[in-house]
């Protein structure tokens, strides 16, 4: 049976690699340890299901001493070493604890590239761990024999992938067996997520003609701006969630209510009500006007939560809870409870009264209609500002470029998940707000997902570039 042949080949190759490491180390050739990190990164991914495992590069290892591989999603850290001594085990665990890395991971694995000792002093290791790490000598110190046993119990397809990884490094090619040689079950499908969030709005749209005295003041091409100027001259204010189209005011606010905020602007006898679809289905121009109303309705909602619309940049930016605050963090719930920094103001070291940089988490949106459903397309971003009015920094583009070079696909998706979680939480907060209850609201649903997608291991994708050494402005601002 070819499965038995695979199992035997896998065990032989692991044992051969272990002997090669032992010989190389004895000759003082330690480079093989570095090569093995990549090999075992792939093997742990396949045999232990660590889909997001990665090999920490030299720069990252400065922040993760004692760790060579990790999967932050599964909270597993692995050290790959050719030193099988008890002292090495104790020193590795001590280093991890001293740098508080045990708080980031639930399991620490020491993988011995050669052959682990027959036994280790549990008492000595437990003394080092001091109750801070749950380290099991029998299951957390591994060598090639443990991986061989794991492979023997793995499904044929997984075992073949693990053997191919070994073959690629040891022979420079696959072992030559095709998929049709086996009949394993198909890989489980992956659920794909679009950057689309369900978006809901009131189902009654109000349209009314503006009063003649208002129109008289609106000879400007920019009718909304002219209307705003008229309102300010009356020393009054109106909500921002409205549009002006063809001398008519369009909004979700009830224009039939004579105590409403727009009553002094519209002709009461011309008020009409429509279902939104009756309006945006007329043609593309009307749909474009309706999308403007949706954006303004979103703008009105977010402004109450200290998120500002930057018209020129077409972005929403997070502001501090109070203008005097230097930071703002938001707690959100994804796979676990976490906090996200959305605003940070830094001051110069040599002049603490002067602001060095002001960084905002930001996002742009667009509105997408799929058949009869509407979605909010969200693109996370960053924004750097200066001054009390949060005007865009002249250095913003360069600083943002440096920030984005560090972000991988997973980071961007986490930004998106955070925004969706935060927006949904706003609905809950607004539900009990007296100010909000009297006005029409837009609300949010679930992220649009697609089932039966082919599994893609994103950890295998090429990482994005890192900051160049001469990006002095970025280093000064601590963009790491």
Image (spheres, helix red, strand yellow):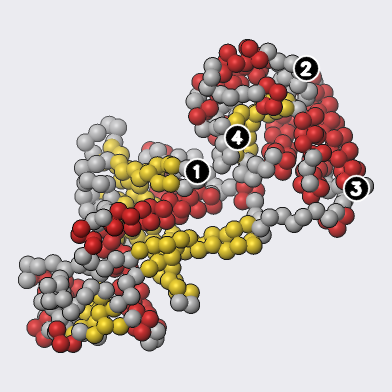
The residue carrying pointer 3 sits among few (fewer than 14), some (14 to 19) or many (20 or more) residues within 10 Å by Cα, namely: few
Among the two numbered marks 1 and 3 on one chain, the one whose residue lies closer to the N terminus: 3
Residue plotted at (58% across, 39% down): 74
Residue 186 seen in render: yes
Q: Is residue 361 left or right of residue 49?
A: left
Circle on res. 43? none
Q: Position of residue 272 (x, y in %)?
A: 24, 85
The residue carrying pointer 1 sits among few (fewer than 14), some (14 to 19) or many (20 or more) residues within 10 Å by Cα, namely: few
* Separation (CA) of disc 4 from disc 3: 33 Å
> Which residue in the structure is indicated by mark 2?
118
Q: Secondary structure at mark 3?
A: helix
> Which residue in the structure is indicated by mark 1?
468
Q: Is residue 155 left or right of residue 377?
A: right
Q: Nearer the viewer, mark 1 or mark 2?
A: 2
Give yes or no for contact between labels 2 and 3 (Cβ–Cβ under 8 Å). Answer: no
Q: Is residue 58 left or right of residue 260?
A: right
Q: Position of residue 413 (x, y in %)?
A: 50, 53
Question: Which of the two residues, 42 or 121, is positioned nearer the viewer here?
Answer: 121
Among the two numbered marks 1 and 4 on one chain, the one whose residue lies closer to the N terminus: 4
Q: Nearer the viewer, mark 1 or mark 3?
A: 3
Residue plotted at (33% across, 58% down): 427
Q: Secondary structure at mark 4?
A: strand
* Separation (CA) of disc 1 from disc 4: 31 Å
Q: Is residue 373 above or below residue 36?
A: below
Q: How many marks?
A: 4
Q: Nearer the viewer, mark 1 or mark 4?
A: 4
Residue plotted at (37% across, 50% down): 361
Q: Secondary structure at mark 2?
A: loop
> Which residue in the structure is indicated by mark 4?
76
Residue extending farthest front: 432
Residue 311 seen in render: no
């Amino acid at each position: 049976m070819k499965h038995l042949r695979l199992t035997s080949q896998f065990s032989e190759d692991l044992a051969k690699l272990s002997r090669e490491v032992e010989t190389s180390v004895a000759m003082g050739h330690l480079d093989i340890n570095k090569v093995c990190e990549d090999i075992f990164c792939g093997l742990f991914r396949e045999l232990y299901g660590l889909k997001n495992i990665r090999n920490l590069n030299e720069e990252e290892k400065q922040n993760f001493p004692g760790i060579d591989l990790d999967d932050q999603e599964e909270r597993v850290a692995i050290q790959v070493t050719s030193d099988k001594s008890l002292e090495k085990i104790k020193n590795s665990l001590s280093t991890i604890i001293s740098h508080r890395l045990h708080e980031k991971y639930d399991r620490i694995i020491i993988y011995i590239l050669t052959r682990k000792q027959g036994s280790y002093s549990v008492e000595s290791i437990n003394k080092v761990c001091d109750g801070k790490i749950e380290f099991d000598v029998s299951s957390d110190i591994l060598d090639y024999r443990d991986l061989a046993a794991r492979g023997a119990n793995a499904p044929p397809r997984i075992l073949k992938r693990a053997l191919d990884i070994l073959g690629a490094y040891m022979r420079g090619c696959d072992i030559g067996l095709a998929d049709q040689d086996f009949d394993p079950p198909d890989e489980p499908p992956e659920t794909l997520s679009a950057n689309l969030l369900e978006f809901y709005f009131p189902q009654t749209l109000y349209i009314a003609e503006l009063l003649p005295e208002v129109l008289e003041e609106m000879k400007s091409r920019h009718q909304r701006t002219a209307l705003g100027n008229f309102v300010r001259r009356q020393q009054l204010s109106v909500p921002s969630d409205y549009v002006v189209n063809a001398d008519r005011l369009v909004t979700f606010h009830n224009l039939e209510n004579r105590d409403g905020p727009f009553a002094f602007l519209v002709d009461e006898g011309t008020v009409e009500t429509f279902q939104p679809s009756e309006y945006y289905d007329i043609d593309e121009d009307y749909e474009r006007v309706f999308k403007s109303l949706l954006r303004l309705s979103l703008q009105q909602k977010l402004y109450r939560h200290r998120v500002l619309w930057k018209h020129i940049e077409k972005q929403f930016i997070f502001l501090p809870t109070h203008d005097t605050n230097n930071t703002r963090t938001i707690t959100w719930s994804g796979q676990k409870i976490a906090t996200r920094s959305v605003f940070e103001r830094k001051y110069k070291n040599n002049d603490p009264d002067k602001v060095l940089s002001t960084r905002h988490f930001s996002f742009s949106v667009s509105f997408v209609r799929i058949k009869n459903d509407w979605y909010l397309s969200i693109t996370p971003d960053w924004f750097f500002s200066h001054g009390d009015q949060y005007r865009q920094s002249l250095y913003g583009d360069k600083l943002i470029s440096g920030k984005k070079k560090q972000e991988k696909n997973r980071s961007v998706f986490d930004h998106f998940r955070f925004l969706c979680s935060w927006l949904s939480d706003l609905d809950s907060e607004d539900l009990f707000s007296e100010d909000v209850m009297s006005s029409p609201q837009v609300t949010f649903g679930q992220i649009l997902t697609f089932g039966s997608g082919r599994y893609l291991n994103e950890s295998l994708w090429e990482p994005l570039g890192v900051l160049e050494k001469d990006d002095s402005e970025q280093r000064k601002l601590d963009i790491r």
